[in-house]
Amino acid sequence: MFDIERWQEIFDTLKKNKLRTILTGISVASGIFILVVLLGFSSGIQNGVTEQFSGDATNRISIRTRSTTKGYKGLNPNRRIQLKNEDFYTISDTYDDFLEYKSAGYSIWGGLINYKNESGNYSVRGVYPDFQFIENAQMLEGRFINVDDIEESRKVIVVGNKTKNELFKGTSPIGELVSVFGINFKVIGVYTDAGGEQEEGNVYIPISSAQIAFNGGDRIRDMTFTVAMSENLDKALELSNGLVTGIERDIKQKYIIAPDDRAAVRVDNTLEEATKIYSLIDVIKAVFWFVGIGTIIAGVVGVGNIMIIIVKERTKEIGIRKALGAEPFSIIGMILQESIFVTMFSGLFGLITGLGLLEIVGPTIENDYIKYPQVDFNTALFTVFLLVVAGTLAGFIPAYRAAKIKPIVALRDE
Amino acid sequence: MIQIKDLHKSYHMGSNSLHVLKGINFNVKEGELVSIMGSSGSGKSTLLNILGMLDEADKGSYILDGVPIKNLNEKVSAQYRNKFLGFIFQSFNLINYKSALDNVAMPLYYQGLKRKERVDKAMHYLEKVGLAEWSHHLPSELSGGQKQRVAIARALASNPKVLLADEPTGALDSVTSHEVMELIQGINDEGKTILVVTHEDDIAHMTKRIVNLKDGVIIDDSPVKQIRAKAHV
């Protein structure tokens, strides 16, 4: 394979047919180029969507109640269902083994917050300490709400980076007092959320303080849990669906709600949505691979075609070689090597241009759903492997034909 | 060197079958220079192809230098061709994108020789045919006579037992023909066995023995007094 003579021969024949070589090369190169770009974008979509999700834990179950829509066991429809602290305790205890983080919430959606002369509207959410992890909030300064804050109903508040910028003009707010509907709270922390600006608009206070300050009593607005994840996504999904059913049934039993009343209790399961989206990404990926491989096949068929013509053109030469003592295998080797060389060279060219394009264009793409399109090393390696296989396939039939050429036929004078 | 007994060969084309060789018996000793004559269709090219292992007989035996040539697979026949035979063709059959030197070195490549050795040997044979200073020219830059001499050098390069020349002067004018024949005679003088297929009488008389073929049988096989080509040049 690595013999200079043969390489020289290959270069000689390729040089003699520049246009043909270039055109064939382009068909392979564009195939690989398209495959690489498509794969890059499919990973971009995956990155984008994953990041959209990373704002919150993907294994989250949230529970809300509204009014009943159906009469049940002598009770009228349109009955307002109100969750209480004890519901949260009960569910937390019942399903403790399967739940990772637990929080109930008592929130004021448009809360007016003042700091000196600045003011703004934020969602004021009374939560438990676990909520930090449910929301994936990263602390920039200070700390999040802790158990003591809850037990002592301290008037403390955690603000988002957005709030910090708006109300405090970027200076550290730790220890400052802000007023929420005229009640003073002390800022104990600043968080940031990968989910973006919208999620940073929330401010957090201990749920007990919220219930006291805003006349909540023992009422809660919602409950949020995360499911303990297992390695296997299918198992996790099954577990989380089981929890959803169990919790919904418990609440419906307690508040005497018709089992088929879908509006009264809403238990949402992000894991199921996430799974759906991930499987959608898988489908997109598969389609991209399919299209990419299809293009490569077209290119490879082109190379095969050209190699057949080359063999035809070189029939006489092959005949001469055989008369001089070339064994069939050496002829096969010659044709195969040329075909692999052409596919490899142009394929690598396509691969590098594709990677280059992703490298240059990738960072400039500003779209929530496509982020950092790129092709990882293994995929690149795989495409190279694919090229070798493709080159061999493309060369095989022509090479086989060449090996079958009878010198006597090839050398017949016309 | 060559022993042929009762050689038959027919070609089938659809329902027609053409009996080309109808029992050829023929021996060639080492160092002979034999011409095979006959009009077209007499079977002389077919005979040469069988001798050259480019084609196989239907019936009969062919022994080359003590080795029976029978039912060879492609690989072995390629090896035998390389080892035993040197071919000279009417249309030279040089590889047109390779220099004279590379053309001559080609059989040595298939013998598995190292590049340096190949070049040395090929150069030696090019010198022998008087084309040393043309070694790096492409066939297209050479005259017909020069091309044939390169082809002869190539045929000699693997030091074969037998040279098979199929109308070696068929594409050349008479002066060049005689130059080529002079070269062939010289090689024969050194002891090489050579078979020449020709339909030209004067070329045939430059060999030492003429075998006449007609309709697939040998009608005459007799030694002749060799005319030295040098006299004509």
Image: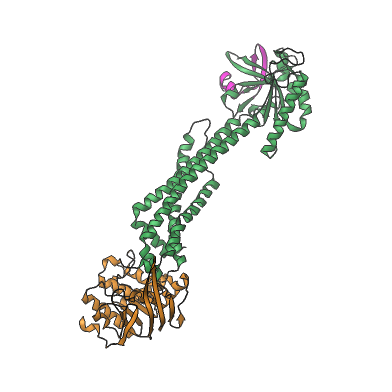
Image check: A53 left or right of B77?
Answer: right
**Is residue A248 toward the left or the right of residue A110 in the image?**
right
The quadrant the C terminus of chain A occupies is bottom left
**Looking at the picture, how far across and down is residue A148, in whole percent?**
75, 23
Above or below, B25 against A223 in this view is below
- Which residue lies most toward the top here? A182
Task: Identify which residue, A88 or A306, lies in the foreground.
Answer: A306
Give the x, y percent position of residue A234: 67, 37
Q: In this view, does B182 lie above or below A129?
A: below
Q: Give the range drawn in magenta.
A: A160-189
Image mark count: 0
The residue shown at (65%, 11%) is A182
Q: Where is residue B23 in the image (x, y as percent from the top left)?
A: 39, 80
Which of B42 and A66 lies nearest the eye of the viewer? B42
Please name the color used to draw chain A: green
Write the residue at 78% across / 24% down.
A90
Q: Is residue A301 magenta?
A: no
